[in-house]
Amino acid sequence: MASRNEREGGYYESWIWSQGVEIHYVIGQSGNPNLDDNVWFSGRIGHLVAEFYRRKTAKVTFAHQEMNAKAGYSNGGSAP
């Protein structure tokens, strides 16, 4: 389960498994993270990497929006 928020993603992944729902992964280790620490750890690494790239992309996007605004563009919204 990929999530933008590592803590939230981990909580919901754990809850889903506790409800008896099986999650099948395309890459990496698979299995119930509540029963196997290696699966839990690799899942958390995936969440952290996703969060890292989300934050990095947000900063780049904001910088471009700021440049557009300074150049007089509206960044998709109605012009003032």
Image (cartoon, helix red, strand yellow):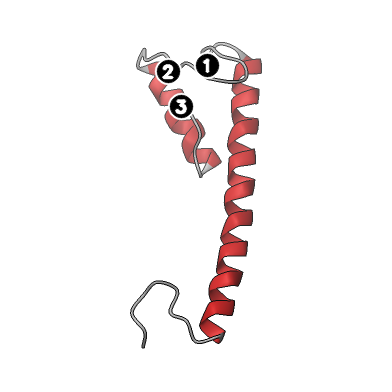
Which residue is labeled 3 in the image?
A: 13
* Badge 2 element: helix
Q: Tell me what residue is drawn at x 60 percent, y 12 percent.
A: 36
Bin the neighbour count of mark 1 within 10 Å (Cα to Cα): few under 14, some 14-19, many 20 and up.
Answer: few
Q: Tell me what residue is drawn at x 46 percent, y 32 percent.
A: 11
- Identify the mark nearer the N-term, 1 or 3: 3
Quadrant housing residue 21? top left
The amino acid marked with disc number 1 is Asn
Q: Where is residue 65 in the image (x, y as percent from the top left)?
A: 53, 73
Which residue is labeled 1 in the image?
A: 34
Front tag of 1 and 3: 3
Marks 1 and 3, how far apart at CA: 9 Å
Which residue is labeled 2 in the image?
A: 17
Q: Is 41 in front, or is 60?
A: 60
Q: Where is residue 58 in the image (x, y as percent from the top left)?
A: 56, 59
Q: In which quarter of the image is the C terminus?
A: bottom left
- Identify the mark nearer the N-term, 1 or 2: 2
Bin the neighbour count of mark 3 within 10 Å (Cα to Cα): few under 14, some 14-19, many 20 and up.
Answer: many
* Badge 3 element: helix
Marks 3 and 2, how far apart at CA: 6 Å
**Is 62 placed above or below 38 here?**
below
Quadrant housing residue 15? top left
* Badge 1 element: loop
Quadrant housing residue 28? top right
The amino acid marked with disc number 3 is Glu
**Is 52 placed above or below 3 here?**
below
**Is 14 placed above or below 69 here?**
above
Q: Check contact, mark 1 vs mark 3: CB within 8 A.
A: no
Q: Check contact, mark 1 vs mark 2: CB within 8 A.
A: yes
Q: Check contact, mark 3 vs mark 2: CB within 8 A.
A: yes
